[in-house]
Image (spheres, helix red, strand yellow):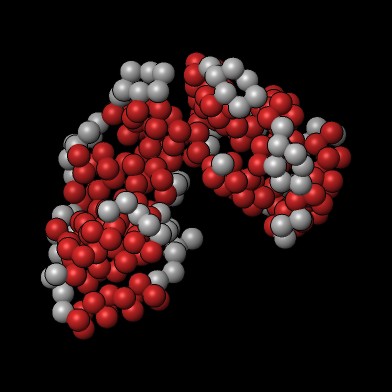
Amino acid sequence: MRGLRASLGALLVAAMASPAAADFDAGAAAYAAGDYAAAFEEWRAPAAAGEAEAQFALGNLYVNAEGVKQDFDEARAWFEKAAAQGHAGGQYQLGLQHEHGWGVEADMAEAMRWYRLAAGQGYASAQYYLGLIYAKGRGVAPDAAEAAGWYRKAAEQGFAEAEHNLAVLYFKGEGVAEDYNEAARLYQSAAEKGYIDAQNNLAGMYALGLGVEQDFVTAYMWATLAAAQDAQNAEENLARIAERLSAEQIAEAERLAAEWKPRK
């Protein structure tokens, strides 16, 4: 449910900056404080009155079982109300429900329809999901170039997962021309946001000097951060990089890792 929670977090930011903020603030504040039951109560009235942001928020609460019992049917009803008003988040969530069969029969064609509507409005999560669908060939013929195009749209909005996946395509030369410099740039951007797979891959780029100047201390720093979050093969990468460093250099890399903070 990570994507669902992330989309609700984005909603809160957008809603609190919108003209409808006065009707939404109390629920947003309660949600931010972890009082999901209070958020539910605050959002019910504006949702019933037709406020799309509140309808979308209620749908997410039902999906995530926050303040209410999980109910995909109820969630879908609220998402449909929001989507009917052109709410990109509601459209995206309907895409998820139809793709994964959450409360409905799984229908990839219907999921794609909703994803495309949301992506067409610039909704980064939907753009990223379309990239995944084309990269993996889920209900469509695999198309790395099409995947790269959708990843790029989301990456241009700073969507870390899309930055990472686009970097992988540049590294492999799939759907785009091979470009280690661009791969390293995208890994760096995603890594700085705390995306662990990007941190792990960026460590490898620094260790090998691909797209960046070879730097084993920086490589060890990124590998340390990735290993702390159990990234796949991070411990093995850390051990290999350590073979190229002195005890003093390892201590410096560990200090840098301890002081590192994600960029928002």
Q: Relative to 217, is 120 on the left or the right?
A: right
Q: Position of residue 13 (x, y in %)?
A: 64, 52
Determine whether 130 is above or below 58 in the image.
above
Asked whether the viewer can see residue 117, the reply is no
Quadrant where the N terminus is found in the figure = top right
Task: List the single residue furthest toward the bottom.
Answer: 248
Identify the residue shown where x is 84% and y is 46%: 41
Number of marks drawn: 0
Identify the residue shown where x is 34% and y is 47%: 164
Depth order, front residue of 120/167: 167
Q: Relative to 95, is 150 on the left or the right?
A: left
Determine whether 184 is above or below 140 in the image.
below
Q: Position of residue 191 (x, y in %)?
A: 36, 57
Identify the residue shown where x is 35% and y is 54%: 231
Q: Relative to 129, is 135 on the left or the right?
A: left
Q: Position of residue 5 (x, y in %)?
A: 60, 46
Q: Relative to 253, is 22 on the left or the right?
A: right
Identify the residue shown where x is 32% and y is 66%: 224
Q: Position of residue 198 (x, y in %)?
A: 33, 53
Determine whether 250 is above or below 57 in the image.
below
Asked whether the viewer can see residue 61, the reply is yes
